[in-house]
Image: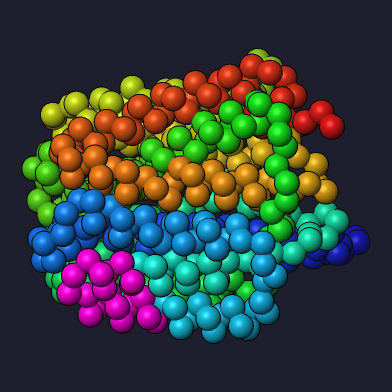
């Protein structure tokens, strides 16, 4: 009897480890976002902040991360990036603890965004056969786990020790994760994006879906407390549970829907279909009054948003050839910068002028508009990221 050969398994282990680390680094800012959203109402009451100021503070890290990630600069050495990230996360935690008003809080949030950018994977030209984009499934699973941890952990710490301790704990967790787990991760340097109209429609539609996801991630706990009367100590835990259930539903449903559409020859409709289906469910979550109804609608809407974003990421990775994978990286960064980064600020500004309930209506509107743009891009075979392979 011959012993089984293990050589074929050895090359897959470093690749799987690198893909897992890359997915973790890309999803790590969601931990800080969820922690901030979990204690947002406590900060508003303690520092006498307006929704506009809170929205700006929530958007600053994502804006800083997006601008610094798109900046065409050489990536420093891994050790330098680790030290810089550690220093910035320490500054973010210290400033959060010392916050006495909007100014100090904004400085803390800017330091958090710069720390995430410093810990991001080094940008360089990928080697042949090297995976430069984390898989959509791995990224969704990691993002859901980190977001749930942020909501539950910060919510519990905020209730027991106050919001300052919750933000310091979030900064410390991010510090440990970025310093120890981002080593060795490599991402492709962003390159020129395709110029055809279908690709631009897909980017615009993806940005609108990312806007809806960012708005929900930041303002969902505050909405549950203000509009549904959920106690302040319970709303972050309820949001974390909804995110976990949505992640489990998305992990199962994405595979089932993708297989069904593949058999029907309509794989390109997964992303726009999920976005369009999420719009009425998000509206139902805002209009329903009974907890069972609005929580079920919220979980399903979040699950469909996760499916749409994962499908968009995987479609970009499939569409562009390996020698232009940097363009997919740049496209995803642009989607995050245009959609997710300003979401909290826009919702906060509208809430400041009207109310949070009216501001959250932007979520179903963005999902509907994004789904329409993605559907227009998917209608043109070979013209956008909805196809399984681009025609070059």
Bounds of the magenta span?
90-108
Image point 65% across, 26% down: which residue? Answer: 198
Residue 325 image offset from top left, x and y in percent: 74, 48
Residue 151 image offset from top left, x and y in percent: 29, 57
Number of residue marks: 0
Residue 162 image offset from top left, x and y in percent: 16, 71
Q: Is residue 31 visible?
A: no
Q: Is residue 251 left or right of residue 108?
A: right
Q: Looking at the image, is 378 positioned above or below residue 330?
A: above
- The N terminus - image quarter: bottom right
Q: Is residue 381 visible?
A: yes
Residue 43 image offset from top left, x and y in percent: 17, 63
Image point 25% across, 25% down: which residue? Answer: 284
The question of residue 97 being in magenta is answered with yes
Image point 55% across, 72% down: which residue? Answer: 118
Q: Is residue 285 left or right of residue 207?
A: left
Q: Main secondary structure of the magenta part?
A: helix
Q: Is residue 243 left or right of residue 84?
A: left
Residue 107 sits in which quadrant? bottom left
Q: Looking at the image, which is closer to me, 46 or 273? A: 46
Q: Looking at the image, is 145 positioned above or below residue 157?
A: above
Q: Looking at the image, which is closer to me, 2 or 119? A: 119
Identify the coloring: rainbow
Q: Looking at the image, which is closer to me, 45 or 4? A: 45
Image point 64% across, 49% down: which residue? Answer: 330
- The C terminus - image quarter: top right
């Amino acid at each position: 009897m011959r012993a089984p050969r293990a050589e074929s398994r050895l090359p897959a282990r470093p690749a799987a480890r690198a893909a897992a680390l890359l997915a973790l680094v890309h999803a790590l800012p969601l931990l800080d976002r969820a922690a901030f959203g979990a204690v947002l109402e406590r900060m508003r009451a303690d520092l006498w902040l307006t929704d506009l100021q809170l929205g700006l503070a929530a958007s600053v890290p994502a804006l800083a991360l997006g601008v610094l990630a798109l900046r065409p600069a050489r990536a420093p050495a891994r050790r330098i990036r680790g030290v810089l990230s550690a220093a910035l996360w320490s500054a973010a935690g210290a400033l959060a603890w010392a916050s006495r008003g909007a100014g100090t809080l904004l400085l803390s949030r800017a330091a958090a965004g710069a720390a995430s950018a410093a810990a991001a994977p080094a940008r360089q030209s990928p080697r042949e056969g090297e995976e430069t984009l984390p898989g959509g499934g791995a990224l969704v699973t990691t993002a859901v786990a980190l977001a749930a941890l942020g909501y539950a952990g910060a919510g519990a710490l905020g209730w027991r020790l106050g919001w300052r301790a919750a933000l310091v704990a979030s900064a410390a967790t991010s510090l440990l994760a970025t310093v120890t787990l981002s080593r060795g991760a490599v991402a492709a340097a962003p390159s020129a994006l395709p110029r055809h109209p279908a690709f631009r429609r897909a980017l615009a539609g993806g940005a609108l879906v990312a806007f809806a996801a960012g708005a929900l991630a930041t303002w969902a706990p505050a909405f549950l407390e203000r509009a549904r009367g959920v106690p302040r100590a319970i709303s972050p835990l309820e949001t974390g549970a909804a995110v976990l259930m949505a992640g489990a539903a998305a992990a199962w449903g994405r595979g089932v829907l993708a297989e069904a559409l593949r058999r029907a020859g309509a794989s390109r409709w997964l992303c726009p279909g999920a976005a369009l289906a999420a719009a009425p469910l998000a509206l139902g979550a805002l209009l329903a009054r009974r907890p069972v109804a609005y929580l079920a609608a919220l979980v399903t809407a979040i699950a469909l948003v996760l499916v749409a974003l994962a499908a968009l990421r995987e479609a970009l990775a499939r569409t562009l050839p390996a020698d232009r994978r940097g363009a997919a990286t740049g496209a995803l960064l642009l989607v995050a910068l245009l959609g997710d980064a300003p979401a909290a600020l826009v919702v906060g500004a509208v809430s400041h002028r009207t109310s949070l309930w009216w501001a959250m209506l932007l979520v179903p509107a963005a999902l509907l508009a994004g789904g329409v743009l993605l559907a227009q891009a998917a209608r043109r075979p070979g013209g956008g990221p909805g196809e399984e392979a681009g025609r070059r």
